[in-house]
Amino acid sequence: MRFRSQSAMEYLMTYGWAVLIIGVVLAALVSLGAFNSATWGPRASPGSCKVFRSTAITSLEGVCTSVIPQSVAQFNGQTSYVSIGTTGLPLGNNPRSAFAWIYWTGSLASSYPTIMEWGDQQIHARASGLRMNQPTGYLNFVGAGDDFLTTFIPTPNAWNFVGYTYSGGTSVTVYYDGQSQTGAVTQLNTVLGSTVPAAIGIPANQLGWYFPGSIADVQVYNTSLDANQVQALYMEGIGGVPVNLQYLVGWWPLNGDFNDYSGNGNTGTPASMAFTSSWTSGYTNP
């Protein structure tokens, strides 16, 4: 009996360290995303999928399914933003929807890190968009002079799907990774300003509240998408294509360029921007 106990202890001492080392290596590989399907999935080159518009048809062209971006846009949180065109952007109290995938670094150095916004920010009541709120990090819809502050806090150093829908009345619905919250707002009265009337990564006309991290697959519609359409867009993942081409007014994948692939010509102009192909850490397919 003593001999067998001694043999068992010797076995554990001999192979236990090997098992421990294997466990440590596996944990490191998991943390680096080695087993994340996004790391090995097919990647879309810039502009490989776009919207084609003619008088007779509106359709998608190119490689538009089961792909992820080659790269994503990086925002340094201090000087980075993308100024975009305004053709077709909903104004006044017209319905609208805006969505994006974001990777927030966890910094709240600026008061309201802004994901996307358009309108006249010099007159707060004339802009609309989605920000994060200091000091909590809650997602915050900014509208006609009164905001809707949700209880959604994007996970730092991870990818999250965020956006909102507005149907033209006095409420807005904010979405976060398949969840939603609806809150009351004053009826919107969005009017374009003159300096930077629409932008990704900063408030319109307000160069100061920069977003720190990465943003990808920004989509804007001049309609209020329904819950099923929003869920479908979320389930497509970070390489998702628009779910309603008829009402799509802007589509910036931010995959290696700043072009608008909605067919509306709202191409972006970058400031202090960079791209990274090493973006899959913190991303999991929905």
Image (tube, rainbow, N blue to C red):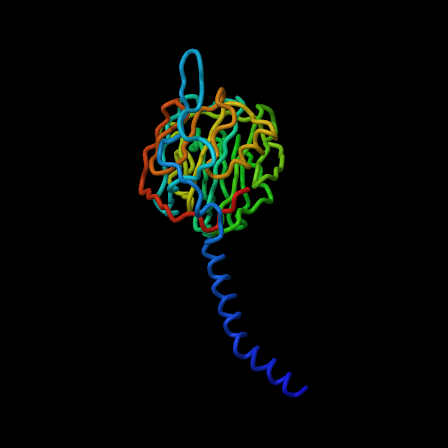
Whether residue 259 is situated above or below residue 238 in the rendered picture: above
Percent x, y of residue 134: 51, 48
Residue 172 left/right relative to 212: right
Whether residue 234 is situated above or below residue 38 in the rendered picture: above
Percent x, y of residue 91: 48, 23
User: Residue visible at 42% across and 44% down?
Assistant: 214
Percent x, y of residue 135: 52, 50
Q: Nearer the viewer, residue 18 or 71?
A: 18
Give the total of numbered labels.
0
User: Residue visible at 44% across and 15% down?
Assistant: 57
The C terminus appears in which quarter of the rendering?
top right
Residue 265 left/right relative to 108: left
Q: Quadrant of residue 254?
A: top left
Q: Nearer the viewer, residue 93 or 125?
A: 93
Q: Farthest residue in the right direction? A: 1
Residue 187 left/right relative to 280: right
Q: Farthest residue in the bottom direction? A: 2
Percent x, y of residue 238: 47, 39
